[in-house]
Amino acid sequence: MERVPVLKIGDILLVSIQIDMEDQVALQLQEDLADRIVATGCHGVIIDISALDIVDSFVGRTLATIASVSRVLDAETVVVGMRPAVAITLVELGLSLPGIRTALNVELGIELLARSRQDELTELDFDEDEPDAAAVSTS
Amino acid sequence: MSDEGQRLPVTTDQDVVRVRQAVRTFSVAVKLSLVDQTKLVTAASELARNTLVYGGGGEVVVTRVQNERRAGIKIVFADEGPGIVDLTLALTDGYTTGGGLGLGLSGARRLVDEFEIDTEPGKGTTITITKWCR
Amino acid sequence: MPLSSDEASRFADLLKEHAESLTARWVELAGASLRGRLSSAELRRQLDDLRKGFEQAMRSGSAHLTDEGSAELRAQLAEISGHRARQGFSATETAVSIFALKDAVLEALGNGDDAGTLRDYVAFSAFVDRAALFTFDSYVQVRESLIADQAEQLLELSTPVVKLWDGVVAVPLVGTLDSARAQVVMERLLQTLVDTGSPYAIIDITGVPAVDTQVAQHVLKTVVAARLMGADCIISGIRPQIAQTIVALGIEFGDIATKASLADALRYVLNKTNRSLNTKRTER
């Protein structure tokens, strides 16, 4: 069975899905990622799906589960590079991927992770004297 | 035009991938738009997985079709599984018996132009979908 | 009344035997209605090819135009109709060219007035009628595809997606949006987001006179799709009537940002991006 590689870059785990995944491969990725998050102590996960020409409900659900599991392990997940046709299809399918943060490309994804991490830290630092800082986080 | 059809068994995860790839090839051949290709392949993926998971495996036949004005693709998913007891319920968004999101049937129906379902409890399920070129 | 195989082969003989004079007469008759817009040499070539086509179809014993033996003839007819349609001839002119064969053949049959010849002729005439109607159909098809092509060109002309600022693109929608156009525009918008890596898009509908449920749905779906991709859409320039319609139709815009003008939308976006930049800077 093929396996999707998980790369570590700084504080981020990067996954680029380049193959048409069997369901089993997707589930394996879900497990691998959880293991790697714990092993590396990374706080961000970027999943690049720009090579995927479809995302069906199974893959959608797997992505959502990865995001939830990562959050429990204190890592933020960003799914990047979704193709327009895929997004249009997901909307039609009725899959809105709640709880998943997205960005247009890997670069913007890294920015988004950095920002939300900073927001978190800012929140900690200014929670008492500067309540506005919390409202700054992007919706 | 049955000679142009392609018959694929669906008994493993890998077969679902093969169905997707076959449908993609057919979609490109009849020149479906990129968005329509994506919609059809996604619908096929959902239904092939249903055939595997709920029908206990079965068969998919992909055929190129043509009416007076347009070309299209017809896909038949057939299994001899337990069938669907309450069709209305099965076609409702969010309803699932298999632990999924419950979007397979209802979602796939929204992604194609024609959707027919023929099922009988204990006798299996046959679903036929068609997508036409614009 | 379909042609019997005997009749068909008799006509094949006739078309061959009188080839020269038939074609000449046909060119003359057909040429009259085309009023010299097609050179007679070209018309002659076309019609002589067609005559051969008819002869071949008759020889193979085709009783109907839809028969296997007439495939070649059908292709020729379709080709001629296509030419005529592109050269601006009317559908009638095209069909009349074919009908003229009947007159030419009638003359070639001479004045044999026995019932057999007459019956033959009626059957053949019906066959030619079918052929003329077929050109009519092909003509319409070609014209339809021409119109479709033009509509597509128009679509491309009328739906620019422009870069407004670093990371901000805008689509100024102008004119009536039908479902097909809305779809194309939205697909293009999403593609531009990817190509330019812009996380913000402004859809300006100042130039749109009316919105129906379907179009509103398309816009909404686009906004949701853009969000799935990681981009935010702002809708600007909603006219009062359109706002009324949207509410009356019960369309939920939910948490989608709407602004009165393109300028307001841009200010809103810049504010948002600045704030996120500022957050970055205040971080120590």
Image (tube, rainbow, N blue to C red):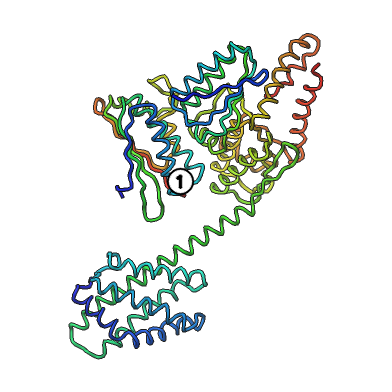
Quarter holding the N terminus of chain A is: top left
Question: Residue A104's quadrant in the figure?
Answer: top right
User: Considering depth in this image, is C105 or C19 the residue closer to the camera?
Assistant: C19
Query: Outermost residue, top direction?
Result: A128
In this rendered view, identify the residue nearer to me: A97 or A26.
A26
Q: Position of residue C157 (x, y in %)?
A: 64, 54
- The C terminus of chain A: image quadrant: top right
Specify the farthest residue to the bottom.
C111
For disc 1, the chain is B
Corner quadrant of residue C29: bottom left
Q: Would you say A48 lies left or right of C126 here?
A: right
Q: Is A112 situated above or below A43?
A: below
Disc 1 crowd rating (10 Å Cα; few below 14, some 14-19, many 20+) is few
Amino acid on which the number 1 mark rests in the picture: Val
Where on the picture, by quarter, is residue C201?
top right
Q: x and y percent of residue B132 in the render?
A: 42, 47
Callout 1: helix, strand or loop? helix
- Is C86 on the left or on the right of B25, as rendered? right
Q: Is residue C50 left or right of residue A42?
A: left
* Closer-to-camera residue (B68/A132): B68
Residue B41 higher or lower than C70, as above or below:
above
Q: Position of residue C42 (x, y in %)?
A: 46, 80
Name the residue beneath numbered marker 1.
Answer: B28
Question: Residue visible at 55% across and 14% down?
Answer: A34
- In the image, taking residue C172 as reference, residue C119 lies left or right, namely left
